[in-house]
Image (spheres, helix red, strand yellow):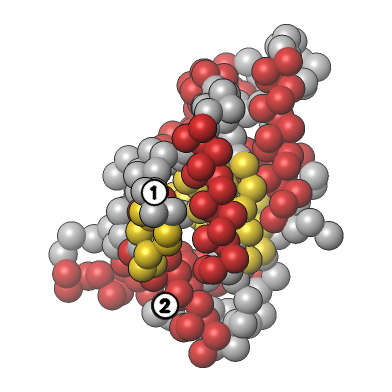
Amino acid sequence: MTETNPDKKAHIIVISNEKGGTGKSTISMHLAIDLLQQGFKVAAIDLDGRQGTLSKYVENRKKFCRTHNLVLPIPSIFTYAPQEDVTLIEANRENISSRINELAKDYDAIIIDTPGTKNYLFEEAHYHADTLITPISDSLIDLNVLADINIDSQTIGRPGHYASFIWDIKKKLASQGHNYLNWIVIGNKTSNYNSKNKNIVFEYLEKLGKLFGFRFTPGLKDRIIYKELFLLGLTVLDMSHPELKMKMTMSHLAAKREVKTIAEFICPE
């Protein structure tokens, strides 16, 4: 691990969960656009270069703007994939850490989208985090990354592998003088229905937050609009742009509120 830069100015937001399919890239892009619309200078780092979902999202946005002769805010994007040659891993880790430190001098915010499986890039991102956002779907299975849950006895067992990893990250950051990690868990890609299963998951996330030191908030619901806008490189925050002439339904307005709520929850004051 390379020591983080004490002179940085950027706020670094890491979107991470040791599980795929939780909507990390959708959150990353929407947060980036929200910050850009507020006038901040934003860089996005895609550490899942093999899949490249966030990178593809940004490329779709650039293509849409070119095709329609439209000017929309676009984050600077930097894409990395893990080295398979073990002799190159440490050098690549150092290179990426140095790049994050350099970008932190020039940007107001850096958003890092991590892969869904743990590797050295995944680890390195966490060492730089000021805010860590962990999306969890409304599935009891997904709770296992945070803790063993016995639904029958309604008890919480040992910490899960991801929660244990974050505990180690907190200790290492503290050893470098970084005593606070703003860890946020959001209930993401959740059903639109007020199901018993979702209520149980959210109840346990509230309890786990008190045990593990994270704040919990509902995130983005599982809406078709997010998938449709990805293909265009757009976000729900763009839909009210006068040149787009896109009709916003009540569902779209609710989606926009969801994004704004997450953004405000990062820094409630």
The quarter of the picture where the C terminus appears is: bottom right
Viewer-side residue, 73 vs 1: 1
Residue 118 appears at what percent x and percent y? 31, 60
Q: Are marks 1 and 2 in contact (CB under 8 Å)?
A: no
On residue 168, which mark appears?
2
Residue furthest to the front in view is 153
Residue 61 appears at what percent x and percent y? 56, 29
As helix, strand or loop, the secondary structure at mark 2 comes to helix
If you read the primary sequence from the N terminus, does the residue marked by circle 1 or circle 2 appear first?
1
On residue 163, which mark appears?
none
Crowding at mark 2 (Cα within 10 Å: few <14, some 14-19, many 20+): few
Label 2 is placed on what type of residue?
Asp
Q: CA distance from mark 1 to mark 2?
A: 27 Å
Label 1 is placed on what type of residue?
Ile
Viewer-side residue, 46 vs 190: 190
Residue 184 appears at what percent x and percent y? 59, 57
Viewer-side residue, 23 vs 41: 23
In this rendering, position of residue 124 left or right of residue 187:
left
Vertical placement of 221 versus 205: above or below? above
Vertical placement of 86 versus 17: above or below? below
Residue at position x 79%, y 47% from top? 39
Residue at position x 60%, y 88% from top? 177
Vertical placement of 115 versus 229: above or below? below
Crowding at mark 1 (Cα within 10 Å: few <14, some 14-19, many 20+): few
Residue at position x 37%, y 65% from top? 157
Residue 54 appears at what percent x and percent y? 46, 40
In this rendering, position of residue 69 left or right of residue 223:
right
* Disc 1 target residue: 151
As helix, strand or loop, the secondary structure at mark 1 comes to loop
Q: Count how many numbered circles sit on residues in the image.
A: 2
User: Quick check: can you spot residue 118?
Assistant: yes
User: Quick check: can you spot residue 162?
Assistant: no
